[in-house]
Amino acid sequence: MAKSVVDPRIKGFICTTAHPVGCAAHVREQVAHVRKQKPIEGVRNVLVIGASTGYGLASRIAAAFGANANTVGVYFERPAQGDRTASAGWYNTVAFNDELRKNCPGVKSININGDAFSDVIKTQVIEAIKKSLGKVDLVVYSLASPRRTHPKTGQVFHSVLKPTGQTFQGKTVNTDRGIVHDVTIDPATEEEIAATVAVMGGEDWQLWMEALHEAGVLAQGARTVAYSYIGPELTWAIYKDGTIGRAKADLDLAVQRIRKMLKPIQGQAFISVNKAVVTQASSAIPVVPLYISLLFKVMKQMHLHEGCIEQMHRLFSELYGGKATIDEAGRIRMDDRELREDVQVAVAAAWPALTTENLHTETDYDAYIAGFLKLFGFGFPDVDYAQPVETELEIGDENG
Ligand code: NAD
């Protein structure tokens, strides 16, 4: 057992420490939001791949606390070691299980920490589903990773966040120093584009669905959803038309193949285009933190603001309530409010004038930074950060 005072240690767009009590407060905040909403009906057993932070954690919370669904959570997180704290996703999962035990007795939580891209973890998940749940009726695919080891060839791919075709020149914010500056990013090579598609594209989602289908652990009528992003034109050069956008376009191909495969069990596959929110993954993308800071200001003024948990509770409510907004390409559009014309007109009007000097007044940058710290358990008013806390916490394999 190791008690220590935990402070944030920020390096670029990552915080290398996490506060266990603060992470628990963050999870409780999300659980409380879901418990205040109308219950979701029609989903019982859910597999969430990428379940420990961001959209995946919010999906798990929405399913468990909103629908009383049993969940299998797959994630890649680090336990505490010596004087290093565990990663935030580790503490989030500990807290998720604690909250579940307190609020939803009998609802199961199965926890699998390891590389979701590997065959070993897929097999482990299938065995766990067979043993504890029989079948799953929803599979959420919410991985965000900088690298992938291909399970068949062993090749290691690294994703990059770059434009394609031409050099990007634009405005971004250095979140370490709160400085708005111009940035020039050279276009990715063909090899870098292919590697990003290999990491963040649809192949692994399809491999998961094939493995689950072949093992007979998908219930009749099972659904699967993977998360994507499009955003407004001002981020397209770096996102939609960049390497990450190429990977997301590959999801559009995978969803067709998965739909075909799931036909015999009347299954359904969806891509949900979600809103831009503060997560560990989005903070690594150039331009996006500045865009999010401005977007939040505009959406809050218009009373349209949503974070991960609001989005995921709405997604599941709409998906199981039969009223999801589907676009002409068959995608669920959870970014409907972000891309509303009045929102984007206001964002586009303010964007050119943003500078270091007006960052705090013209955007919600302070809330962005606070949101970033919250991802690691920092900044919760009820947590006494001067107190030493237990950092070596265990996650059981199964709860409930
Ligand atoms: P995140 O960084 O908060 O979460 C990533 C999750 O993936 C974590 O649970 C992590 O443990 C897990 N993970 C990473 N590598 C893994 C591996 N090898 N094996 C097992 N688990 C692994 O990211 P996020 O922002 O919530 O992104 C989730 C999805 O949502 C992504 O597809 C992303 O593109 C999409 N999305 C994000 C935003 C946004 O603004 N953040 C908007 C729209 C869509």
Image (cartoon, grey):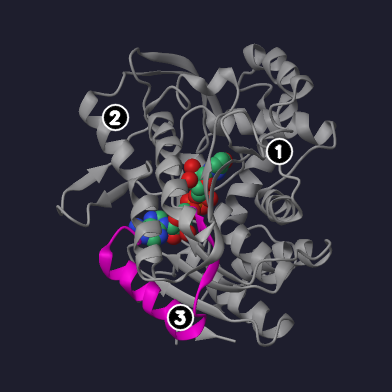
**Under tag 3, what secondary structure?**
loop
At label 3, the amino acid type is: Glu
Q: Residues within 10 Å of mark 1 (few under 14, many from 20)?
A: some
The segment highlighted magenta reads 116-142
Q: Which residue bears the numbered disc 2?
A: 193
Real-space Cα distance between discs 1 and 2?
31 Å
Judge whether residue 138 is colored magenta. Answer: yes
Along the viewing direction, whichever of 368 and 361 lies nearer the viewer: 368
Q: Position of residue 102 (x, y in %)?
A: 71, 84
Q: CA distance from mark 3 to mark 1?
A: 43 Å
Nearest the eye: 54 or 125: 125
Q: Amino acid at mark 1?
A: Thr
Query: Secondary structure under badge 1?
Result: loop
Q: Mark 2, residues whose alpha carbon is within 10 Å: few (<14), some, or many (≥20)?
A: many
In the rendered view of the protein, which quadrant contains the N terminus? bottom left
Q: Quadrant of the C terminus?
A: bottom right
Which residue occupies the foreground of this view, 226 or 94?
A: 226
**Residue 168 percent coordinates (x, y):** 40, 15
User: For the residue marked with disc 2, what is the amino acid?
Assistant: Ile
- Horizontal side of 314 relative to 245 (left or right) equals right
Q: What is the C-alpha distance between the residues marked 3 and 2?
A: 39 Å
Q: Where is residue 274 shown, x and y percent of the image?
A: 61, 41
| In this view, 33 is above or below 225 | below
Of mark 1 and mark 2, the one earlier in the sequence is 2
Residue 214, by quadrant, is bottom left
User: Nearer the viewer's eye, disc 3 or disc 1?
Assistant: 1
Nearer the viewer's eye, disc 1 or disc 2?
Answer: 1
Counting residues from the start of the chain, the first of labels 3 and 1 encountered is: 1
Residue at the spot of label 1:
325
Q: Is mark 1 within 8 Å of ligand 1?
A: no
Q: Which mark is residue 182?
A: none
Circle 3 is placed at which residue position? 392
